[in-house]
Amino acid sequence: MINQTVLADYRAHGVACVPQVLSSHWIERLAKATDVALTSIPEDAEIYEGSREAPLSYGELQVWKRLSPFREAIFEGSLARLAARAMDSSSARFFYDQLLVKEPGSTRRTPWHQDIPYWRVSGRQICSIWLALDIIPGNAALEFVRGSHVWEEHNPQHFLDASPYEGTGLAALPDIETARKDYDIASFDLAPGDALIFQGAIVHGAPPAGEAARRRAWSTRWLGDDAIFAEKQGERAFPADVTDLEHGKPYAGPDYPLIHRGN
């Protein structure tokens, strides 16, 4: 499922495209569950564009706790093994998931950002697996600044209004969008079941879905051997509620299950 070319891309550029990481059976179940999610939107879901009654751009964290197909895919599918292999880690601990939907007619861009600055986590063995549930052409899929996974961390921003996070002490990210020609930007054509696996520090963003396409994707986040819980100064997004986690120690507990451990 993950060959040496894919591994080389991930390690050199911070992102790789992996075809058909889950079977059509899983993709059909997850696509149906996504539509169920949109008929029963929870209060803490984020509507980036449109309305709660008709969202054009939608994000929901922790959907695995709400709908069983997502939970079963985490525990029974091959995602954890893929994450461990890419991260060169003996283990893969589930961090959290995010359901992301952009409907035809969406016009709002997902801003350029790094993930790790949003999170109370430190380490290099941290990745996301962004799974396509629809045919997604490269001009509607995630875009990446290849090689930026080795950059320093930059200040997060709120997706709803682009306001910067407060008190982090981090510098603002360069304005990628107005200087695209200065960066090595990559995107990928995706079929249902294809996935983008990317390191947590890589700079990425996404265009609107466009007029003729629907873009449903499910992103799972994974922690490897060196990932630890880290208290950081200023505003951070996840986890929002910290209970039994200790600074400098690995994540643990039922909210962060260890899914894969190598022999």
Image (tube, grey):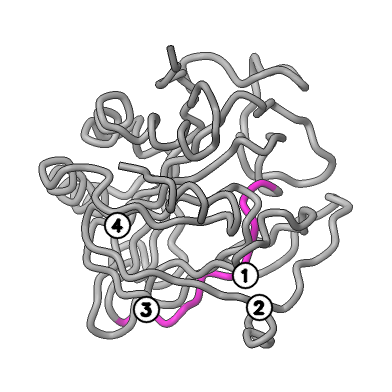
- The residue that disc 4 covers is 132
Q: Nearer the viewer, residue 98 or 144?
A: 144
Indicate the position of residue 144 as horizontal and vertical percent values: 55, 67
Which label was assigned to residue 106?
A: 3
Q: Earlier in the sequence, mark 2 or mark 3?
A: 3
Q: Secondary structure at mark 2?
A: loop
Which label was assigned to residue 183?
A: 2
Name which residue type carries label 4: Ala
- Residue at 71% x, 67% y is 163
Going by the image, does 90 lie left or right of 176? left
Q: CA distance from mark 1 to mark 2?
A: 25 Å
Going by the image, does 120 lie left or right of 251? right
Name which residue type carries label 3: Ser
Q: CA distance from mark 1 to mark 3?
A: 16 Å
Which label was assigned to residue 161?
A: 1
Q: Which residues are magenta?
A: 105-116
Q: Secondary structure at mark 4?
A: strand
- Residue 136, quarter of picture: bottom left
Q: Earlier in the sequence, mark 4 or mark 1?
A: 4
Q: Earlier in the sequence, mark 1 or mark 3?
A: 3
Pair 2/4: label in front: 2
Q: CA distance from mark 2 to mark 3?
A: 25 Å
Indicate the position of residue 198 as horizontal and vertical percent values: 51, 51
